[in-house]
Image (cartoon, helix red, strand yellow):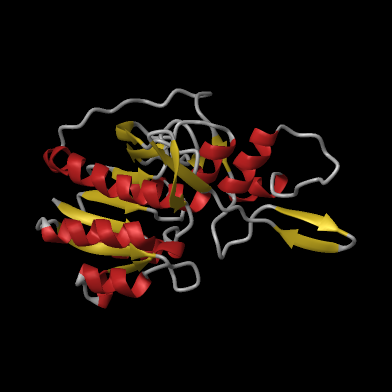
Amino acid sequence: MRILYLGNNWLGLKALEWLKAQGAQIVGLVAHPEKTARYRDEILRASGLPESAIIDGSRLKRASVLESVAALKPDLGLSVLFGYIVRKPFLDLLPSGCINLHPAYLPYNRGKYPNVWSIVERTPAGVSLHYMNEGVDTGDIIARLKVPIDAADTGESLYHKLEQAGLELMRATWPSLQSGKVRRIPQRRGQGSFHLASDVDRIDELKLDQKRKVRDILDLLRARTFPPYSGAFFRDRGRKIQVRIQLIEEETSKGAASKDERTSQH
């Protein structure tokens, strides 16, 4: 099977390295341009592909780029944390379709920042493999894996849990993907949830005089704790103050408090 790989970030790198180790035939790489890429150089090296087989992911709508993709004669597209929406002209070039690894337990948390919304909205967290269509994470589901959310999790620690779970799901499902013998579970319209990147803007500001449940405030603070990225904040006398939270679990043994402490920070 000739695979066109679309990848970004640490998970995109690790999934590609694992696929190469399994002998997968990667014939082309669709990568983020430098301004939006993470681990770009490592992904390029891991692909082992010549420059002629590297496609700029931000230009997939261009006819000349689609011609370059067609010239690679891919059978299947495989996307891992690829951040650009793909459309029908591109998808039509892949006879076996295009499969995406999304760090959410679909149909919950389609779109951006699933690690944040699983905590804030208390929806199931996990990872999913699904077929891509012209929607955002709306295609038929192939496989899912739930990830438990611990009371000491932050947006950062949950993000890393989802990375590891995504790699696990890829490894477990790969034999079925290779054979083409996979279940397709349609996502029903109206089920689950969807978020834009900008949706966090409406939850990040803490109004100092607003009455809210402690649980809701704690969930927001831990969901938006992911240094060095900005998160929750409040304003005081013209100043904007960023807020992060540190969660420390006190372990006990036989009813006696232990001196050992576990922090959720990385």
Give percent across and percent down for residue 50: 22, 75
Q: How many marks?
A: 0
Q: Is 108 or 84 nearer to us in this picture?
A: 108
- Residue 156 is left or right of residue 169, and the answer is right
Q: Is 134 or 45 nearer to us in this picture?
A: 45
Residue at image point 64% right, 55% down: 231
Residue at image point 35% right, 61% down: 10
Q: In this rendering, does residue 72 appear at all?
A: no
Give percent across and percent down for residue 233: 72, 54
Please say if 111 is above or below 188.
Answer: below
Please say if 94 is above or below 44.
Answer: above
- Residue 236 is left or right of residue 141, and the answer is right
Residue at image point 44% right, 64% down: 59
Give percent across and percent down for residue 198: 64, 50
Give percent across and percent down for residue 154: 51, 48
Q: Quadrant of the C terminus?
A: bottom left
- Residue 162 is left or right of residue 44, and the answer is right
Q: Residue furthest right?
A: 237
